[in-house]
C-alpha cells in the first residue's frame, strides 16, 4: 500500500516490487537454471524488478492442485485414560465458558 498523504496521481506511478535478501540469490539462481520456464521470473526477482502482476502471472502459470494422500494421514488416537477424562474436560470447558460469559456481562454492565 501507499501512505494516504501521497496523492493518487503520484502513487499510481510508483512501481511496487518485491525485495529478496541477497543470501537467497544462490537458491533463486539455481531454481532458475534448473527450471527454464521460471528463469525470467527468478531474474526479475533477483534484479528487484518483479511486480505483483509478474508474481500473479508466475503463480497461476505454475500452480498445481494439491495432492492429499488421505491414507497417510494418521487417525486421531486417545488412550483409555484420556477417554475416561473426557467428561471432566467437557465440564471444565463449560465452567470456563460460563465464567467468561459472567465476566463479560459484568464488565458490559459497568
Image (cartoon, helix red, strand yellow):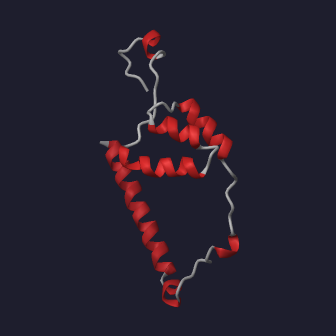
**8 up-or-down from 25: above or below:** above
Q: Residue 26 in the image: x percent, y percent?
A: 43, 50
How far from the left and from the top, in percent, is residue 12? Answer: 48, 16
Query: For the C terminus, which image quadrant?
Result: top left
Q: 109 or 11: nearer the eye?
A: 11
Quarter of the image holding residue 56?
Answer: top right
Q: Is residue 45 left or right of residue 72?
A: left
- Choose between 51 and 30: the one closer to the eye: 30
Q: Along the line of sight, which residue is nearer the eye, 40 or 2?
A: 40
Residue at the (35%, 43%) spot, across then down: 108
Q: Quadrant of the N terminus?
A: top left
Q: 14 above or below 103?
A: above
Q: Is residue 7 left or right of residue 36?
A: left
Q: Is residue 86 above or below residue 12?
A: below
For the point 66% across and 46% down, the residue is 62
Residue furthest front in the image = 33
Horizontal relation, residue 12 to residue 3: left or right? right
Give percent across and percent down for residue 42. 52, 41
Observer-nearest residue: 4 or 94?
A: 4
Q: Position of residue 67 (x, y in %)?
A: 69, 61
Which residue appears farthest toward the left when viewing the image?
Answer: 110
The residue under the point 46% across, 79% down is 88
User: Which residue corresponds to the image point at 55% horizontal and 47% vertical from the top-left?
Assistant: 32
Quarter of the image for residue 19 reads: top left
Q: How many marks?
A: 0
Amino acid at each position: 500500500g501507499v501512505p494516504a498523504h501521497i496523492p493518487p496521481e503520484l502513487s499510481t506511478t510508483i512501481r511496487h516490487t518485491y525485495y529478496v535478501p541477497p543470501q537467497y540469490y544462490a537458491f533463486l539462481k539455481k531454481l532458475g537454471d534448473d527450471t527454464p520456464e521460471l528463469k525470467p521470473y527468478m531474474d526479475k526477482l533477483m534484479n528487484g524488478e518483479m511486480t505483483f502482476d509478474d508474481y500473479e502471472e508466475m503463480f497461476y502459470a505454475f500452480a498445481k492442485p494439491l495432492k492429499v494422500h488421505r491414507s497417510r494421514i494418521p487417525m486421531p488416537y486417545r488412550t483409555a485414560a484420556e477417554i475416561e477424562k473426557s467428561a471432566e474436560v467437557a465440564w471444565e470447558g463449560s465452567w470456563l465458558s460460563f465464567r467468561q460469559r459472567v465476566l463479560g456481562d459484568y464488565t458490559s454492565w459497568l
